[in-house]
Image (cartoon, helix red, strand yellow):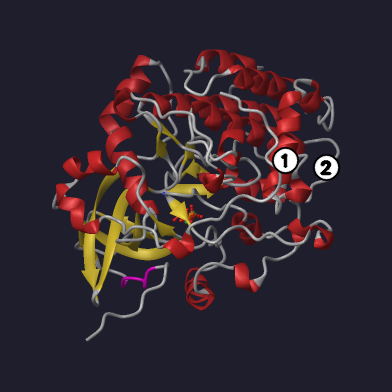
Amino acid sequence: MAPPKKSALPKPLPDGFILTDTEKKKWRLGRVIGQGGFGLIYLASPHVDRPVAADTDFVIKLEYHDNGPLFSELKFYQRAAKPESMRKWTRSRKLDFLGIPTYWGSGLAEYNNLRYRFMAMDRLGTDLQKFLESNAGRMKKATVLQLGQELVDVLEYIHENEYVHADIKAANLMQGHRDPDQIYLADYGLSYRYCPDGHHKEYKESPKKGHNGTMEYTSLDAHKGVDPSRRGDLQILGFCLLHWLCGSLPWDKVLKYPAHVQEAKTKLMDNLPDSVKQLSVSRESSTDEVAAFLLYVKTLNYQEKPNYQHLKDLLSRAVRGRLDFSRPEGPAAVSSTRGQDPGTREKQNVGRAGRARGAKAPVRDEEQDDGMRSKPVLAQYRRGPPSQKEEVLHEVGRSLRPRRGPVTYVDDSDEEQEEEEDDEEDEARPRAIAACYLRGPPIGPRSQSKQV
Ligand SMILES: Nc1ncnc2c1ncn2[C@@H]1O[C@H](COP(=O)(O)OP(=O)(O)OP(=O)(O)O)[C@@H](O)[C@H]1O
């Protein structure tokens, strides 16, 4: 009998299903509490003899075994986020907390002729995009600066462990399940090993890979198709901080035109610090610190190690204490983000060519653009099988938000090296990308001079 036809989102496994990880540890599945473009998030428990408690501290992320992002995420956790190594780092740096979720195990499973990959990890709480959506896209300045400092700590740790995240944004920042003051950087599905075994990738512009990442925040390097690096992560973070402070970004209205976004970001970076300072919506929410942050990031060479302490110093200004996600004072920014459904926002994330390639973000005639960010994504641009996704959404309730759609995946350039390490995973390796999914050349002018 032919195996059932697959779509990107896995056919759910039944409640109570028992999974065995590579360490022979068993995990019991509870209910589904989230879904992404490729996978489902289940409550889970290592106590397999009883139903999973509603307040369990664990979740399992489940995807079809050859889908891809989970494979990539797993590699990140296995190489870079070992609990012992994080503990050591936290102690040596005298940090109270490091916002990277703990990985508890992973494995493969089979059910009804379908093969799955799973990963057990810390359960997390609400993502920060939800706060932004109820606060006109803004956060209080003290909160923004504090988040910025905490994220610099997280980035320093992952950068020192040969990885960059490459997709920092509020939707990937989640509160702790037990402690809402602990903020975790989640979703390492697009993380990239920029410095395998201490050898930094070379600077190389590649039009075929241009404009990858989440369009609002992706770095200028990514716009040019350059592999992600440390300075790119910091530039993405700078754009996020600016967005959270102001509620909007200068390129909000042209997000469907990657070349225009690139142009607007180049202009902003070329005219620092004034270009950022003038975006302040009020004195209380002045953007001076973010201007200084981005100005420093601009000085970094592609392979240069940032001075993380200096970056934190630039953001420090009475920013200790509890995080306050209430609505900031002052005028609401004129933001085209407001009112836009999160699904539409997420469709602007086009993934990384060569790793998570897929349908390109929709590009339409310019004449048609009259603030199109608030318009729904056209049906033909929606990735994945809407019917199945909608079914699952109904089952699991309103907390679920569709994010990126399915893309065919190819592993990063570490393939040969990984082969040695992953003998037992060989069979599970994601398939090579089909030619029909390769992204075409970027649209629009490429007028920038090289910046290495
Ligand atoms: N560790 C976790 N604990 C609790 N909920 C989680 C956890 N990780 C993810 N979620 C929830 O599940 C949803 C899907 O997460 P997931 O990381 O699979 O997908 P995504 O990042 O939204 O999209 P994609 O899979 O396309 O990258 C998230 O929106 C979040 O609400």
The Cα–Cα distance between marks 2 and 1, rounded to whole angstroms, is: 8 Å
Q: Name which quarter of the figure residue 364 lies in.
A: bottom right
Q: Name which quarter of the figure residue 79 lies in.
A: top left
Note whether 147 is above or below 102 in the view shown: above
Q: Nearer the viewer, residue 18 or 274?
A: 274
Q: Is residue 21 visible?
A: no
Residue 39 as seen in the image, left or right of residue 339: left
Mark 1 residue crowding within 10 angstroms, few (<14) / some (14–19) / many (20+)? many
Q: Name the dominant secondary structure of the magenta segment.
A: loop
Q: Nearer the viewer, residue 34 or 383?
A: 383
Note whether 278 is above or below 178 in the view shown: above
Name which residue type carries label 2: Ala
Answer yes or no: disc 2 within 8 Å of ligand 1. no
Residue at 39% from the left image edge and 40% from the top image edge:
101
Q: Which residue is labeled 2 in the image?
A: 332
Magenta stretch in the rendered image: 10-14
Q: Which residue is labeled 1 in the image?
A: 138
Q: Nearer the viewer, residue 10 or 30?
A: 10
The image shows residue 234 at horizontal and vertical percentages of 56, 28
The image shows residue 446 at horizontal and vertical percentages of 67, 40
Q: Is residue 229 visible?
A: yes
Residue 425 on the magenta span: no
SS of the residue under disc 2: loop
Label 2 with label 1: CB-CB less than 8 Å = yes
SS of the residue under disc 1: loop
The mark that comes first in sequence, 2 or 1, is 1
The image shows residue 189 at horizontal and vertical percentages of 42, 48
Q: Name which quarter of the figure residue 38 lies in.
A: bottom left
